[in-house]
Structure formats: structure tokens, C-alpha cells
């Protein structure tokens, strides 16, 4: 099992294998570690019940739990992005095929899992000791769906 002490456990509505394949196709340093299948567990014979996968060194477990529970924004996965190109890449990939963009760098992927796609520059600019500058950056960010570094920088420079 994992050397990781705490592992995020995700409940999918009979889409565990598809979700693991989707996520591992997006993140460069990722892999499916294990897929547990049970024969005669569903109407179509063999069914994936659980799986383990890694994204950028972080391990996740997944369960085909059915429709009983849904993801909410109360839990999200935060992606720290070094560049605007990285923000654009993850935003586009995770909103593809039925994902939903939201505000302030948040989105839901096609499985309903919430993500925050955040450029590192946002935190740098908001940490400025000048409250006028950090507030201007915050106000600019609140107007965005996908976060645009150039607009954050412009708000910062004009404050």
C-alpha cells in the first residue's frame, strides 16, 4: 500500500476507471497504480470496484460507489501553476467534455470533482505588504473565471 499517511478517497458513480484514465492523461507525472475488479459484480459482468492512482506524486483512491453521493465544492483539488500556459492547459483539459468553469479559478470536471487552477503569481501579488495593491489583485481575481496573470499584474501595477 501507500507510504503516504493520508490519501484522498474519491467516490464515483460507476466511473472509476474512466476517471483514473482521464486524470492520468492530463498530469504528466501520473500513473494508475492498481485497479480492483470483481467478476459478476454488475449487470455487465466484470466491474471495477476500486482503484489507486497517482497525480504528481500524490496518491488517490477511487471507488465505484454508485449514485448515492456526489462531489461538492466543499472539497476541491488545488493545482499550483507556475505559468499562465500551465493555467490554460489544466483549465482546458479539466473543463473538456462536460466540465464546468466557475469563478476565481474554480471549475468542475466532467465527473463533478472541483478543482482550483491557480497561478503562483496570484499568491505572490496578494502577499504584498501594500494593502491597496493586494486588494486590487483580489478584486481583479473576483471578476475572473479562469485566472489571467496579465490582468492580475495590471491591477497590481495600477494600484
Image: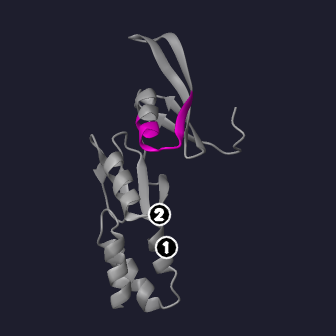
Counting other residues with Cα less than 10 Å from the Cα at mark 2, is it few (<14), some (14-19), or many (20 or more)?
few
Q: Which residue is mark 2?
A: 82
* Secondary structure beneath label 1: helix
Q: Position of residue 47 (x, y in %)?
A: 46, 16
What residue lies at 42% left-to-right and 64% top-to-bottom? 83
Counting other residues with Cα less than 10 Å from the Cα at mark 1, is it few (<14), some (14-19), or many (20 or more)?
few
Q: Marks 1 and 2: CB-CB under 8 Å?
A: no
Above or below — where is 86 with respect to 98?
Answer: below
Q: Position of residue 128 (x, y in %)?
A: 50, 85
From the viewer's perspective, is 106 left or right of 59? left
Above or below — where is 95 with respect to 154?
Answer: above
Q: Is residue 26 magenta?
A: yes
From the viewer's perspective, is 29 left or right of 12? right
Q: Is residue 12 visible in this depiction of the protein? A: no
| Rendered image quadrant of residue 33 | top right
| Rendered image quadrant of residue 13 | top left
Q: Quadrant of the C terminus?
A: bottom left
Q: Which residues are magenta?
A: 22-33
Q: Quadrant of the N terminus?
A: top right
Q: Is residue 109 magenta?
A: no
Q: Position of residue 65 (x, y in %)?
A: 48, 28
* Secondary structure beneath label 2: loop
What residue lies at 53% left-to-right and 14% top-to-bottom? 38
Q: Which mark is residue 123?
A: 1
Q: Position of residue 88 (x, y in %)?
A: 34, 57
Which one is in front, 37 or 122?
122
Amino acid at each position: 500500500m501507500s507510504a503516504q499517511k493520508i490519501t484522498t478517497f474519491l467516490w464515483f458513480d460507476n466511473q472509476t476507471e474512466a476517471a483514473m484514465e482521464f486524470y492520468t492523461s492530463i498530469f504528466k507525472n501520473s500513473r494508475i497504480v492498481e485497479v480492483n475488479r470483481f467478476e459478476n459484480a454488475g449487470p455487465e459482468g466484470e466491474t471495477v470496484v476500486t482503484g489507486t492512482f497517482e497525480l504528481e506524486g500524490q496518491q488517490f483512491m477511487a471507488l465505484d460507489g454508485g449514485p448515492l453521493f456526489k462531489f461538492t465544492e466543499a472539497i476541491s483539488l488545488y493545482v499550483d501553476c507556475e505559468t499562465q500556459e500551465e493555467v490554460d492547459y489544466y483549465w482546458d483539459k479539466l473543463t473538456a467534455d462536460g466540465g464546468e468553469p466557475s469563478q476565481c479559478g474554480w471549475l468542475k470536471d466532467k465527473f463533478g470533482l472541483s478543482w482550483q487552477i491557480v497561478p503562483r503569481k496570484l499568491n505572490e501579488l496578494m502577499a504584498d505588504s501594500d494593502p491597496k495593491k493586494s486588494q486590487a489583485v483580489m478584486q481583479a481575481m473576483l471578476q475572473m473565471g479562469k485566472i489571467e496573470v496579465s490582468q492580475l499584474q495590471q491591477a497590481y501595477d495600477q494600484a
